[in-house]
Image (cartoon, helix red, strand yellow):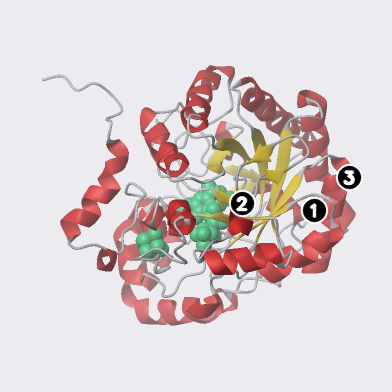
Amino acid sequence: MTFDAIFQPLRFRSLTVKNRIFRSNVSGRFDNYDGSGNPTRINWETKFARGGVGAIISSFVPVHLRGRIVPNYAMIDHDRHIPFWRAVGRAVHEYDCRFILQLSHGGRQRDINGIEYPIGLSSTSKSDPLHGFRCEAMTTAQITETVAHFAEGARRAREAGLDGVELHGANGYLITQFLSSAINDRTDEYGGSLENRARFVLEVVRAIRARVGKDFHLQMKISAQEFDDALAFLGLGSSGNTLQESVQVCQWLVEAGVDAIHVSSGSFFPHPRNPAGADFPVEDLVKSYDTMISNGERTFANFLLFKGAGGLARRRWNQAAGPPEEIEGKNLPDARAIKAAVSVPVICTGGFQTASVIAKALGAGDCDAVSIARPLIANNDLVEVFRSGRDRAEKPCTYCNRCLVNVVENPLGCYDETRFPSRDAMVAQIMSVFDPPPFVETV
Ligand SMILES: Cc1cc2nc3c(=O)[nH]c(=O)nc-3n(C[C@H](O)[C@H](O)[C@H](O)COP(=O)(O)O)c2cc1C
Ligand code: SF4
């Protein structure tokens, strides 16, 4: 069987990608505490470039120290980081793979604060409801500064020779905190109506265009539907932005100069629907969540809930996630609606790992490309599997989400032991990211 639709090049306004599979934003805490890069990240990204993806979209790259979500993620907040990102770009370019850097600011949503800025910035002064990370509402001056930080990040990415940037406007981070009707409680010109809530991200887009010009690829990841009430049993809010509102925001983004839309969902992260799991891995979560206990106002209570009432937490989360058979292509209906309303290509994320499903979505015009995270962690060579005519990898990703709950504490890799001949084989796969080692060991 051939899956020709997957292997057609995709032309954006100023970027061409050789096929329709993008590595979605994902990485472990492989870099240095101070935000400088580390060769382990190059090993990580190279795995996917070698495996045949057309483009890699980086994980969360903070544009400012106060916007980081966890230490040990490489940043783009200073010119001194340009050489590192240049090295990352060169390494993946060797495989004719493009590299798009995700410009990010966490706002109030974090995993581990780090020592520099224990209190985050946001559209609101309400703590994040999941973990209770404290924050303060940004002043107009802080908004203006943050817009400039995004523009400088884009300029640095361009100087590093990367192929484009993506705004992390999805999953509850700072841009979502402005866009979301469930989160943004401002009474100034950045809150209230949809137009006001979109003002921050549109200012970011215009500032980036003013800084890097028209011919540098710029895309936006957006949560088309927020489902902020998915954990209503924890007292979490209204449903948040609707698909219709997001369609309007996407139209404004394109008018302002965005070249592609990357469709996701959820007003916080992780969210039952993103990354949607087959079963909430509460036992693994208890082993790593301790890392976060001292950081948020609700983290200790959450830890006790996961430890003492794990069955309940698992049932509630699974209910909100929906049936496992609906994970693959979960966001496709939203991607289709957005694609019908905008003139730029649309990339869809969420569960993709079957060539015939992807080819069908592309053929039907639901989206122009798919982005894949967990199934590529499970099978780095998935694109080559498809190229050889196989519909699925021999051992597909089980959507167990053990990779996700381990990542705050342990290296990122596949943690589903059932996919490996032994636990040792699983550990060897995880640890392979440190080969070659990041520094020269002395005897
Ligand atoms: C461990 C892990 C880390 C992630 N980090 C990011 C991130 O930094 N930025 C982002 O936009 N999405 C992030 N995501 C979401 C993925 O990019 C992807 O959109 C989501 O997992 C759904 O795709 P999948 O079903 O192919 O995994 C992460 C997902 C996982 C599992
Ligand atoms: S741990 Fe492995 S099988 Fe489970 S979701 Fe992550 S990549 Fe997929």
Q: Specify the label residue 20 is tagged with.
A: 2
Frontmost of labels 3 and 1 is: 3
Q: Give the crowd class for mark 3: few <14, some 14-19, many >=20 residues within 10 Å.
A: some
For marks 1 and 2, the one nearer the N-term is 2
Residue at image coords 46%, 37%? 73
Give the residue type at disc 2: Arg
Residue 119 seen in render:
yes
Answer left or right for 43 relative to 266. Answer: left
**In front here: 382 or 63?**
382
Residue, disc 3: 255
Residue, disc 1: 186
Relative to 308, residue 203 above or below: above
Residue at the left extreme of this rendering = 443
Q: Secondary structure at mark 1?
A: loop
Ligand 2's quadrant is bottom left
Q: What is the C-alpha distance between the residues marked 3 and 2?
A: 24 Å
Q: What is the C-alpha distance between the residues marked 1 and 2?
A: 39 Å
Name the image quarter holding the C terminus. top left
Give the residue type at disc 3: Glu
- Residue 281: where, in percent of width, then height? 37, 70
- Residue 422: where, in percent of width, then height? 17, 61
**In front here: 101 or 161?**
161
Instruction: Find residue 222 and report its image quarter.
Output: bottom right
Q: Secondary structure at mark 3?
A: helix
For marks 3 and 2, the one nearer the N-term is 2
Give the residue type at disc 1: Arg
